[in-house]
Amino acid sequence: MRYLNASQAAKRLGVADKTIRRWLQEGEKGKWKLTAMRTSSNQLAIPESDIDRIQRALEQERSQFVTADQRRDNRDTSRHGEALEARIEDLEQEVATLKARVAALEQEKLTVQGKRKPVSTLGTSDTDQIQRAQKHTGERKSEVPARFPPGTLPATDFATKIGMKYDHFKNFIKRGISGQRLDITEIPHPTRSGYTQYFLTSEQQEAAYTLLRQYGKLLDEGQE
């Protein structure tokens, strides 16, 4: 049988020398029941088998503490993540509301400016040219694929139909409403890689309108 002195035992267990000596003083009555003999040169001789036994017990205790700390950290991380998601959703809705307000103010400004606008001196050909340029640079409407049932609308047209800004409606498509997802038909964009087009059949339109109305989301847009 091999024996270790106090310093060797302490190094093996990762504790201080005085801790080993305290355990030896506690003897059989202590938690670790550690004992030792004295050599002819009055050196402590601790059985290596006892140190191995204590080392296994310490490693088991430490692993339990680590596991408990990890569970606590995971719970804290989960709660923090949920709070961040809720805050992000609130901010996105606030942004959508602000965008709607800005659009309304811009429309009001254009209306006032239109009332003050002088009579145009442009000829017919000039007007036609401007209209063609505006049509060319404007956003292209999503075409409803022929395979979809009659009455299907692009999500942009449906948002216009119910008096809601599309950015706001798109936010509901992606995040849902109070935990409920909108039933939407999605297809890859035919010309823009990585983009998605959204459509609603007649049944999906009715279900979406009912859900939006149920949670008062139509009122957020003022039902313009």
Image: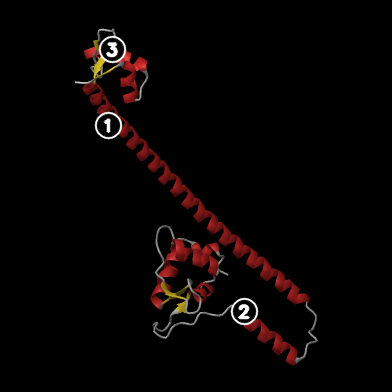
Report the amino acid beneath label 2: Gly
Q: Mark 1 points at which residue?
A: 60
Which residue is painted at 33% across and 37% down in the image?
67
Q: Which residue sits furthest front?
A: 41
Above or below, 69 relative to 201: above
Label 3 crowding class (10 Å Cα cut-off): few <14, some 14-19, many 20+? some
Q: Mark 3 points at which residue?
A: 44
Above or below, 10 relative to 180: above
Element type at mark 3 = strand
| Upstream in sequence: badge 2 or badge 3 | 3
Label 2 crowding class (10 Å Cα cut-off): few <14, some 14-19, many 20+? few
Report the amino acid beneath label 1: Gln
Q: Is residue 188 left or right of residue 43?
A: right
Image spot of residue 28 (x, y percent): 21, 14
Q: Is residue 43 visible?
A: yes
Q: In this view, does 2 lie to the left or right of 160?
A: left
Which residue is painted at 68% across and 85% down in the image?
131
Q: Name the residue under label 2.
A: 138
**Image quarter of the N terminus:** top left
Which residue is painted at 25% across and 14% down in the image?
45
Report the amino acid beneath label 3: Leu
In three-dimensional space, the C-alpha distance between marks 2 and 3, rounded to whole angstroms, equals: 91 Å
**Image quarter of the C terminus:** bottom right
